[in-house]
Amino acid sequence: MSEFKDKVVIITGAGGGLGKSHALEFASRGAKIVVNDLGGSGDGIGSGDAADRVVDEIRAAGGEAIANKASVSSKEGAQSIVDDAISAYGTVDILVNNAGILRDKSFKKMTLQDWDIVMDVHLNGSAYVTAAAWPIMYDKNYGRIVMTSSTSGIYGNFGQANYGAAKMGMLGLANVLAIEGRSKNVTCNVLAPAASTRLINTIPGRDEDLDNPDPMRHPKLVTPAVLLMCAEDAPTNKVIQAGNGRFSTCAIFNNAELEFGADVTYEDLVAKKDQLLDMSEAKEGWTAIRKRMENKG
Ligand code: NAI
């Protein structure tokens, strides 16, 4: 029997693209899906019935799903997604924060409205839906949460200050939730996907043929990483990059600390600048700080 059979899975922004692919795959393995999607355009305008269409597709294939058309960026909307899961299926086991929009502009041209809306959907929206699901998962000692981040946040990308900041913020949120959920069997991991979707086509200069997509850029090539992060034996606090049939884990590294006394000066540091900036022998994480933080959980 599939390990996902009868699991209650919320996927935000599952009316198309990556979220739809995750929803179809979980459903085909017997999970009960809450398909959330506002149904708007790639830059977050308007609403539509994208969620209904995915629910119809799941049901036509013999699966179980309900639609929720709320915006994740409204606190009430986010709560309604979890409330709908409880009303229909009694609980929530898995949450994939996936909803997203783009408002790409160089930082000089970006309006603060472009900043706010992108932060609201990605970072605040993920926090709002997770906050609604968290007590349920925490109290029942089971939960699997995925944050959909992006290489644009992890490494940076021209024209995506708002998006990159929001996506890196989601990684920061995941770091803390992984620590706080560890003793309660609530895992939190991060996905950095790559696939042909309509979101990608909102990036200036991108024009991928979504009707005849490159098979290696299909969203379904990302979905196995999401299932792995939501499995019974899921890892926690990992960042998995997935796309084009390739998968890898990425992490933050730091080099050995330079130790000075209480009389350290700017000149002392400048004298060791090459050593300070040399990452050739860097290791993952800042072990001492990490251990101290994890012990608080
Ligand atoms: P998509 O545009 O096909 O899917 C995003 C979905 O989110 C849409 O169906 C949209 O209606 C929905 N949505 C937008 N705002 C919402 C809101 N406030 N409440 C509820 N639903 C909302 O794009 P794609 O590519 O499938 O995006 C999924 C996630 O993957 C996004 O978070 C995106 O930032 C992320 N991502 C995608 C990459 C790619 O290569 N496609 C690369 C890196 C990250």
Image (cartoon, rainbow, N blue to C red):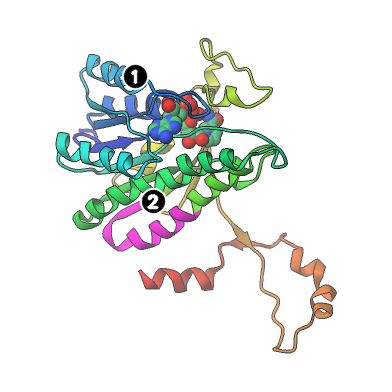
Q: Where is residue 107 in the image (x, y as percent from the top left)?
A: 69, 42
Q: Does the magenta stretch include residue 141?
A: no
Label located before the other in sequence (2 or 1): 1
Please name the residue shown 58% across and 56% down the image. 252
Q: What element carries label 2?
A: strand
Q: Quadrant of the C terminus?
A: bottom left
Q: Is residue 135 above or below residue 227?
A: below
Local packing at callout 1 (Cα closer than 10 Å; few below 14, some 14-19, many 20+) is some
Q: In this view, does 272 lie above or below 85?
A: below
Q: In this view, does 62 lie to the left or right of 53?
A: left
Q: In this view, does 38 lie to the left or right of 208?
A: left
In whole angstroms, how far apart are the C-alphas of marks 2 and 1? 29 Å
Q: Position of residue 270 (x, y in %)?
A: 83, 73
- The range drawn in magenta is 172-187
Is residue 154 shown to the viewer in this render?
Answer: yes
Please name the residue shown 23% across and 14% down the image. 60
In the image, what residue type sits under mark 2? Cys
Q: Are dots 2 and 1 in contact, CB under 8 Å? A: no
Q: Position of residue 282 (x, y in %)?
A: 66, 62
| Observer-nearest of 165 and 177 | 165
Please name the residue shown 26% across and 28% down the image. 29
Viewer-nearest of discs 2 and 1 = 1
Label 2 beta carbon less than 8 Å to ligand 1: no
Q: In this view, does 211 lie to the left or right of 81?
A: right
Residue occupied by mark 2: 188
Q: Position of residue 21 (x, y in %)?
A: 39, 25
- Residue 49 numbered mark, or none: 1
Q: Is residue 96 above or below residue 140?
A: above
Local packing at callout 2 (Cα closer than 10 Å; few below 14, some 14-19, many 20+) is many
In the image, what residue type sits under mark 1? Asp
Label 1 beta carbon less than 8 Å to ligand 1: no
